[in-house]
Amino acid sequence: SQQGEEDPQALSIQEGENATMNCSYKTSINNLQWYRQNSGRGLVHLILIRSNEREKHSGRLRVTLDTSKKSSSLLITASRAADTASYFCATVSNSGYALNFGKGTSLLVTP
Amino acid sequence: DVKVTQSSRYLVKRTGEKVFLECVQDMDHENMFWYRQDPGLGLRLIYFSYDVKMKEKGDIPEGYSVSREKKERFSLILESASTNQTSMYLCASRTGGRETQYFGPGTRLLVL
């Protein structure tokens, strides 16, 4: 069952611009993760933010979490063409093992 | 680096065939997962295994079975392939107690 929903579904920007993607989820969480998927490939883990954290950075990535609004955002600064991919947020399912993914945001960065 | 490999990148099968998708991970991970990914539906969990010989149904197990005889290998079996099983299949693994999953490159299956 899906837990997260990303917004927007698609985003097109130019190199050097910032890209912001949002994720909303439904139930309480211990942590939220973001993954990237290049076209036709597997998913790659980007960053994990715990429920007691409000903001986390990793290189050009900045993730925020607002548990009161059940939402998270992923900011990619100074985008590059190589950032072109789909981005998914994920939360741990009720089983405690698997992840529930949203449908993703498709990001296109043009030179 | 964690490596998760899947036996095929592309596979074409006929309706009614028995199909085996293999996944191998090299990091001694306890948990392994099979997802399918379809446009507009995102990733959906088919089955997972939390240990050798242990398996649990996910959200869409119908028409599938799994096998985990060895810790490093998790197989997805389509007992009698149907056209609605045409999809991208993604295998993932993780070590127990850690949240991050590591994905294979995916198998794109076409059932004719």
Image (cartoon, rainbow, N blue to C red):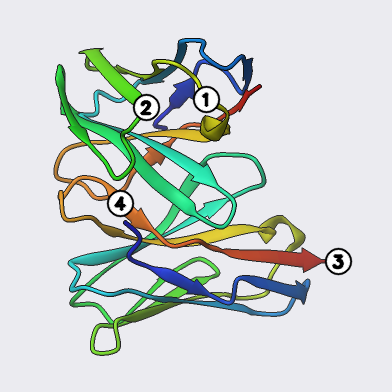
Say whether residue B75 is visible: yes
Sequence-wise, which precedes: disc 1 or disc 2? 2
Q: Quadrant of the C terminus of chain A?
A: bottom right
Q: Quadrant of residue B79?
A: top left
**Marks 2 & 4 on one chain:** no
Q: Position of residue B96 (x, y in %)?
A: 16, 38
**Alpha-carbon distance for marks 4 and 1?**
26 Å
Contact between marks 4 and 1 (CB within 8 A): the answer is no
Disc sitting over residue A99 in the figure = 4
Contact between marks 2 and 3 (CB within 8 A): the answer is no
Sequence-wise, which precedes: disc 3 or disc 4? 4
Up/down of B52 relative to A67, above or below: above
Q: Residue furthest right?
A: A111
Up/down of B29 relative to B36, above or below: above
Q: Residues within 10 Å of mark 3 (few under 14, many from 20)?
A: few
Left or right, residue B13 beside residue B96 = right
Q: For mark 1, what is the residue?
A: B82
Q: Amino acid at mark 1?
A: Ser
Q: Amino acid at mark 2?
A: Gly
* Residue plotted at (59% across, 51% down): B39
